[in-house]
Structures are given as C-alpha cells and as structure tokens.
Image (cartoon, rainbow, N blue to C red):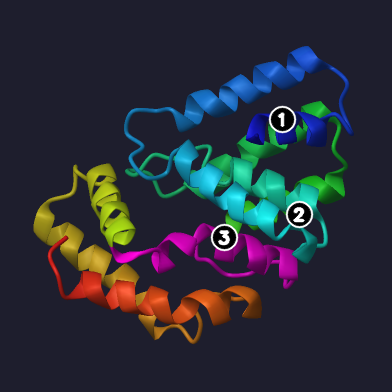
Amino acid sequence: MIEKFFYSTVNKFCKNNNLIKFNWEQIIEKYSEKHRYYHNFIHIEKMFSKYTENISETDNFNAVFLSILYHDVVYEPKNSDNEEKSALFAEKHLQEFGFTPIIIEKIKKMILSTQKHIDLLNEFDNKFFLDLDLMILASELEEYKIYARRIRKEYAFVPKILYKIKRKQVLNNFLNSERIFLTDFFYEKLEEKARRNIKYELFNDL
C-alpha cells in the first residue's frame, strides 16, 4: 500500500520508474537494519494508516506523506544527528525526483521537527505529522509495554541505570509539557491515554 502510494506521489514529478524503484529500495533497506526494534517500517506503516484515515485534514498531503516516509530513514541510536541525516537523505531523493525547492524545504523542516517535537513551521500539517509520530504513546497498555521494551532494545548498549535516568527525563518532559498532542484532533482522542501510559512506565519496570 505504501509503495503504491509512493509511486503515485513521486510520479507526479518524476517519470523515471527505474530511479523511483532504486530509491524506494534504498528506503526499505534503511528501515530493515537489524538494530531497529521500534524505528522500523512497522512504525511507518502505522503512521501511514492513520494518515490515510484522516488525509482530508491535511493541507499538503504529499508533504505529510513524504515526511512520514523519510523521517526515520537514518536511525542510529548512538548518534544525535539522525534527524539532520534523514532530512538530507530525503532532500537528495526529492531533488532527484524533481520536487520543487519549496516542498523539499517543508519536508526537511518537518523531519527536523521530530528532534524536539516542536512545530517548526507553525502549520497544521507539521502538528498533524508530529502527532502521528507520537500515537504509540496512547496505544493500549500491552502494546505500549511492547513499544517501551523495543526502545530499550535499541539502546541495549546503554547501562540499565543510566538508561532509566535518561528515559525518565524523556517521559517527564512529555508529562510536563502543556500538551503532548498539538492538534485538537489528536489531543481530544489521545492525550489522557498517553499520559496514563507514560505514568505507568515511570512507576513500573518494563
């Protein structure tokens, strides 16, 4: 489904199917890396599924879709520049496809916004995209537990005590924020559940 959507989106700008196929295979290869337990293509598929359910909410659905697809394409837990590298990876592909500089810059900004989950564009599309990325926080408790354990596996190189300290900081940042979900659409549906799950993780050894 995503592959078909990718081809139809890119074909609006590029008719070179060999190039599209080559770049698609690069994307799949990146998301298939062995160290990815959560930040893999399953995460992208879940974001895409919710996105297609609510595609009419977005202003530039091409930009939102491509931001979803590329935002974690570079992911190495030991590095702090994954968002920058993902944005550059996306830029290279999109330039090859012939997307306009305006669209490319918007997609790059949206990808970079995941670094601190701050809307850098002051646009609904950016907020909507960020909320899609955080949907897992409001999943059913058992699914949330699996998510938390997979994140831990991605950071298996970090000693347990240090990981707990860092993870607690991340979770408390969410709880201390005025809103986890930036759009009213997601806030009303998911905010309370997300906060409940985060508190559960804080007080239980997952």
107 relative to 173 in the view: left or right:
right
Span of residues in magenta: 114-141
Residue type highlighted by circle 2: Lys
The residue tagged with tag 3: helix, strand or loop? helix
Task: Say which residue label 3 marks.
Answer: 132
Residue 191 x, y percent position in the rendering: 47, 79
First in sequence: mark 2 vs mark 3: 2
Nearest the viewer among 79 and 129 is: 129
Query: Can residue 180 be seen from the camera position used here?
Result: no
Residue 149 x, y percent position in the rendering: 23, 52
Which label is found at residue 154? none
- Of the residues tagged 1 and 3, which is closer to the observer? 1
Which image quadrant is residue 118 in? bottom right
Q: Residue at x 28, y 72 (%)?
A: 169
The residue tagged with tag 2: helix, strand or loop? helix
Residue 8 x, y percent position in the rendering: 81, 32
Magenta highlight on residue 122: yes
Magenta highlight on residue 200: no
First in sequence: mark 1 vs mark 2: 1
Which label is found at residue 106? 2
Task: Say which residue label 1 marks.
Answer: 4
- Of the residues tagged 1 and 2, which is closer to the observer? 1
Vertical placement of 116 versus 86: above or below?
below
133 relative to 146 in the view: left or right:
right
**Tally of numbered discs:** 3
Q: Residue at x 88, y 42 (%)?
A: 100
- Separation of residues labelled 2 and 3 (CA atoms): 17 Å
Q: Residue at x 50, y 65 (%)?
A: 116
The residue tagged with tag 1: helix, strand or loop? helix
First in sequence: mark 1 vs mark 3: 1
Nearest the viewer among 44 and 171 is: 44
195 relative to 190 in the view: left or right:
left
